[in-house]
Image (cartoon, rainbow, N blue to C red):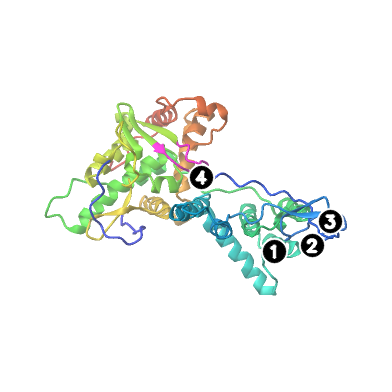
Amino acid sequence: MTESTATAADPAGPLPAAPPAPREPVAAAPAALAQGGPGPGTGATGEVLHGELVAVRTGGVLAAGPGPARLDVERWLADHRPRDGADLARLRDLADDVAMYAQASRAPATMRKYDSGWAAFTDWCAEFGFEAGPPAAVEVVALYLAQMGRDRLAISTMDGRLAAIRDRHLEAGLLPPTDDLRLRRVRDGVRRVRGRPTEGVDAIGLPLLAAMLASLPAGPAPGADTPLADRRTHLAALRDRCLLTVGYLAALRREELAGLPVDHLELRPEGLRLLVARSKADQHASGRRIDLPWAPESVAWLCPVRAALAWLDVSGRRQYLHRPGRVRTGAVPLLSGITVGARLRRTAITDRHVARVVKATAEAAGQLAEVVDQLAGHSLRAGFATAAEAAGAPRPVIARVLGHGSGTTDRYIRHTWDGQAQRAVYGWAAATIGPPHGS
């Protein structure tokens, strides 16, 4: 297939040598003036309605609450001079570390979602001349919620935008209007009136996956006199076969697949073991391991181990596979862009490129445009879960591959070779689907 470049422009070059705590919830505490009377934005009983500085009334005295969600250590140090002879340079470095850790407390994708949600809210406020704040009046947020209901936005989209509004207020040390019980009643009403069943992207079934892989014939290895376009096509075919099979059998989220480093794969006698060091459901990097067994010869076309090794061999990256005792650096991506000169980029593909490969190969497999439109990067993950259940794999086994398992007991279970769900899919594929043409 023809590849669409999905990485930021960067020169292809040599690869490197092989090798803070969650924020406490802010309580909606009463706020009052030092004189004891109700402050602005409070009801007759003094309860905070919206947009007030977090504070607690203690014996008639206004006591400061948690304040801004981000610590300003540099300002604090300016008011608290250390003793003479103290290492000021180290303190400045520590202050920089505090800021860096605070910034890393949430994933970049979460911050982008919050920025987008806040921009949508401020644009709506500007249309009517309302102050977006922070603080934003709870009545303004209620009107915006009604607007989103009229626009028939998905409940998840509404929740995401309300979360963005809440985050901006917490960042400013303000009680968010989204925590107001009256607004929550409006939101519950929107859910009852406008709620609808969630419709995710379509799952890729095994017959469609077989057709998609058949649309990527790698052919013989190109020689020195092979035209650049043909060499590039050969590389892209092997890479995309690796992307589809590993993405499918490991049931990876598209960002997990796009960012998977080579040294997070370990070749074992049974197959490949993948380490997903961090994920959407694992922000603190506990990590999860996924075992991909060799597929039987009858379904070799479906084997992620063969596809991954073929790609690693042609890309020259097999040497970066993890070995016991070697430190994982994550420096070499499994999946990279390919230049017009048939050279590999040093950076990983983007998660959006995963979706583009899925759609392009489905189209090349002869699927109608209406079918292609319903597919996305998540279709690989959904497809595996659907196929594994149809193959008779137990739900807990499928959940373990998907990374949905949780609980204290998980911390005490040491990982042994698994691959049960994948073997069930192999058996079902062998019984229901013959070898695809061109495989």
Q: Which mark is residue 280?
A: 4
- Earlier along the polypeptide chain: callout 3 or callout 2? 2
Residue 112 on the magenta span:
no
- Earlier along the polypeptide chain: callout 1 or callout 4? 1
Q: Which mark is residue 41?
A: 2
Residue 286 on the magenta span:
yes
- Earlier along the polypeptide chain: callout 2 or callout 4? 2
Quarter of the rendering containing residue 266: top left
The residues tagged by marks 1 and 3 sit, at their Cα atoms, a distance apart of 18 Å
Q: Which mark is residue 46?
A: 3
Left or right of 13, for residue 243: right
Of helix, strand and loop, which one carries label 2? loop
Q: Mark 1 Cα within 10 Å, few/some/many (few <14, many 20+)?
A: many
Mark 4 vs mark 3: give the one in front: 3
Magenta highlight: main SS: loop
Coordinates of residue 57 in the picture (x, y in percent): 79, 52
